[in-house]
Image (cartoon, helix red, strand yellow):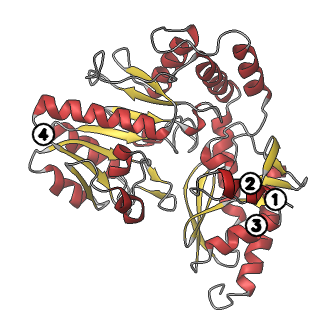
Amino acid sequence: MTTWQDEASRDLLNLGGRLALLVRGEGSHVWDADGVRYLDFLGGIAVNALGHAHPVFVDAAAKQAATLAHVSNYFATPQQLELAARLKRLAGAGQSGHVFFANSGSEANETAIKLARLHAHKTGKKTILSLAGAFHGRTMGSLSLTPKPAYQDPFRPLLPDVAHIEVTVEALERALADDTVAALFVEPIQGEAGVVPLPDGFLRRARELTTEHGALLIVDEVQTGVGRTGEWFAFQREGIIPDAMSLAKGIAAGFPLGALVTFGENDLFYPGTHNSTFGGNPLATAVGNAVLAEIENTDLLANVTTRGTQLRNAVRGVPLVTGTRGAGLLIGITLSAPVAADVRDAAQRRGLIVNAPTADVIRIAPAYTIGDAEVDEFTTLFTAALAEVAASHPKESK
C-alpha cells in the first residue's frame, strides 16, 4: 500500500520536513488525514496571524478571486494602492516613503539588497553588513546575508562585499569606522537563531552610526512584523526610523505576500531595476488589507501582549525550562539540555505543534486570536511533553 510519505518521497524534492499530512484548519487547530487534531502553536512559522480559515481571510479571498485576481505589474489596482498606503501609515514611513510588493520574505530581502547595491553605487561604499546568527532567506542574495555554513557552503561563491559581524555595539562601531559600509541588515529578534533579541540599545546605536557614516539601516521584519511582537513593527519599540524594512509572513496571514517599505528619501529604484510579475496582485493585496484591518480594528495587538505574558508565566519553573525570550507571541523557550527536537516530537504525539530552531530552544508563534482556552490547552500538552523528555534526562531537568 502506498502511503503519503511514499508519494512525497517519489514526487517532491527532499528539501523539507514532512511531519504530518495536514488537510484542514480552523482557528488555532489543524487536522491531519487520519482525523487527528493538533493545536497549532507554530502558526505556519509566524504566518497565520488570524489562525486558520478566519472568516475575514476567507471572505476577502473569495470576493477578490471572483472579481479580479491578477493583472501583472503593468497595471495598478485599488487593493494594491490601499495596502501600500496602509503599510506606510502603520510603519510611520511618511509621505515620501514607498512600497514594493513581492511574494515572500526572501524576495523582499532581495529587493532590499538591490536597494543597498544602488546606494553603494551612489556613494562609492561597497560593503553590506549582516549579523552573526542572522537569517534573511535562502535565495542567493538573502543567503549571502545568512552566515550559516550548512546553508551557504553548497552554493558558494555567494555575493561579494558582504561581511558578518558579532552582535555587539563594539563590533558595529569597528565595522562602520572606515566608512566603507553601504548598508546594515538587522532582525530585531533573530527567530531562526532561537528567538534571540538584539542587545539593549543595539538598534538605537545602529541607527546613530549608520546615519553618521552614510549607510542604510535595513530592518528585516519578516518574522517580527505586522504585530507579532505586540507592536506593529518591532523597530518601533526602540523609537527609531530605519531606511527600509522588509516584510512577509503575517502580512496576509497565509496568502503569499511580501513587501519592502522605504522611509524618507531612500528609494533609489527606477524603472527596470526591479519588479515582480505576481508581486502585489489584487488577490494578495485584498487579503493583506483585510488581515491588517482586522488586526487594527479588533485591537489584536493588545491580545498579543496579554497572551504572550500568560504563556511565559505558564512555562516558568517547568522541568527542563530555563527561561523565555522574545516579545509578544514570538517566544523562545530555552531548555537546560539540547533536547528541543525530542520535546517537539513529544508535543506532536500529544497533539501540539511547536518547533525547534536550535538544539536547546522551542519556538512558539501562535495566532494573535488565541484566548484562555488555547493557552490552557498549550500548557497541558507542553508540560506533558516536557515531563516525558525530562524523565529520560533526569540530570538536565533539575
Q: Residue at x 80, y 41 (%)?
A: 27
Q: Helix, strand or loop at disc 1?
A: loop
Alpha carbon separation for disc pair 1 and 2: 6 Å
> Which quarter of the figure has residue 39?
bottom right
**Of residues 17 and 125, the one drawn nearer to the viewer in this rendering:** 17
For residue 202, above or below residue 153 = above
In this figure, which residue is indicated by the disc labeled 3? 347
Q: How many marks?
A: 4
Position of residue 156 measured from the top left corner of the image (x, y, whole percent): 30, 56
Mark 2 vs mark 4, foreground winner is 2
Alpha carbon separation for disc pair 4 and 1: 55 Å
> The disc labelled 1 sits on which kind of residue?
Thr
> The disc labelled 2 sits on which kind of residue?
Glu
Q: Helix, strand or loop at disc 2?
A: helix
Whichever of callouts 1 and 3 sits on the residue coming sooner in the sequence is 1
> The disc labelled 3 sits on which kind of residue?
Ala
In this figure, which residue is indicated by the disc labeled 1? 3
Q: Helix, strand or loop at disc 4?
A: loop
Whichever of callouts 3 and 2 sits on the residue coming sooner in the sequence is 2
Within 10 Å of disc 3 (Cα), the crowding (few <14, some 14-19, many 20+) is: many
In this figure, which residue is indicated by the disc labeled 2? 7
